[in-house]
Image: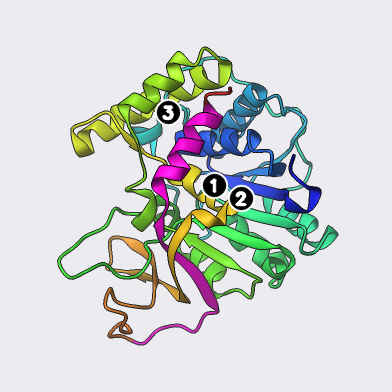
Amino acid sequence: MTAPDDIRHIVLDTDTGIDDALALLYLAGRPDAELSAITAVYGNTPVDSSLTNIARVLKVAGLEDTLVARGADRPIVGEPAIAHLVHGRDGLGDLWSDPIAPKNLSPLSAAELIVELGRSRPGYYDLLPVGPLTNIGLALELDPEILTLYRSVVIMGGSGPFPPLGVSQMVDANIQNDGEAARRVFAAPRNELVMVGVNVTAGTIVDEQQVEALARAGTEWGTFSAQVLGAYMDFYQHAWGRRVSSAHDGLAAALLVQPSWITGSRRGPVNIVTDGYSVRAHLLETHEGYPPSWPTEPAPDTLVVTEVDREGFLRDFIRVLSGR
């Protein structure tokens, strides 16, 4: 049995696409995690679809009374880029036609709720943003010290240190979608900020056999997980020639509740960098450990994850999502 002091009380900020939905369901099944509130943002899908998808997953999880808030529908600067090609028009692979709404929708905006919760119990909640950081950037407008009131902030986003020479990386949509919000977050004072970037999530792969195991589980959780992963693999098969997918947000959620799965990390300031096309969050170190060759912005240290226990995580991820 999990002791009360070992439970993480999580405020999940999500642009509820497929990997977000599975991260939400995974946390719902972990005895050491409590979903205290969920805030919606645009990104994988428009913000109203994100709310619908939160409601759908909470129904599967039996957590329909969880507090939910509507957040930003666009970045602080610019227009939203919605990932319809990856997650479908509705964000969950267009598998359902019945729109549903959260049963416990807050009258506060997502940014307001993030500030209210942090102020209400300093050091009690963990903040887990797994979408564009717009809601967090707006919360920092309301209270520039808000991240210091959270026990930790774990972000699915960023690209880790700069890669080795000649190696390119997957573009991280969460940072790409709102570079200004990301700049605010990485520059803000905080207790602990952990960056779980595509440098580790892209190689954390749910394969065909694991999806088949979910489908065979014969549970509502397993069936739901296998269905949405099937839609996700429809996209990813064109990247790798196989029907597999990366467990991006699920890995970030898991590392919040089980940081022992972090097997390698570096600590230092993170800046938002762009080549005029892609926007990335990078630890200010080259692969060899040297500083970059241009002037950088001052920022507090971030714990940047570089290696994880993929086998341990994936074994637990599939077990929990199977609903057994």
Disc ID at residue 254: 1
- State the residue position of label 2: 257
* Vertical comparison of 140 with 254: above or below: below
- How far is disc 1 from disc 3 in space, using C-alphas? 27 Å
Tell which of 301 and 118 is nearer to you: 301
- How far is disc 2 from disc 1 in space, using C-alphas? 5 Å
Tell which of 134 and 237 is nearer to you: 237
Tell me if mark 3 has few (under 14), some (14-19) or many (20+) residues whose alpha carbon lies within 10 angstroms of its own: some
**In terms of sequence position, does the residue under pointer 1 or pointer 3 come before the other?**
3
Q: Secondary structure at mark 2?
A: helix
* Residue kind at label 3, given as amino acid type: Arg
Residue at image point 63% right, 33% down:
29
User: In the rendered structure, are the residues bearing label 2 and label 1 in contact, judged by CB atoms less than 8 Å apart?
Assistant: yes
**In terms of sequence position, does the residue under pointer 3 or pointer 2 come before the other?**
3
Tell which of 23 and 64 is nearer to you: 23
Q: Is residue 133 visible?
A: no
Disc ID at residue 89: 3
Question: Is residue 31 rendered to the left or right of residue 227?
Answer: right
* Residue kind at label 1, given as amino acid type: Ala
User: In the rendered structure, are the residues bearing label 3 and label 2 in contact, judged by CB atoms less than 8 Å apart?
Assistant: no
Between disc 3 and disc 2, the foreground one is 2
- How far is disc 3 from disc 2 in space, using C-alphas? 31 Å
Quarter where residue 216 is shown:
top left
Give the image location of residue 193, x and y in percent.
Answer: 57, 66
Count the labels in the image.
3
Q: Residue furthest right?
A: 120
Tell me if mark 2 has few (under 14), some (14-19) or many (20+) residues whose alpha carbon lies within 10 angstroms of its own: many
* Residue kind at label 2, given as amino acid type: Val
Give the image location of residue 139, x and y in percent.
Answer: 67, 61
Residue range corresponding to the magenta coloring: 295-321
Give the image location of residue 17, x and y in percent.
Answer: 48, 36
Disc ID at residue 200: none
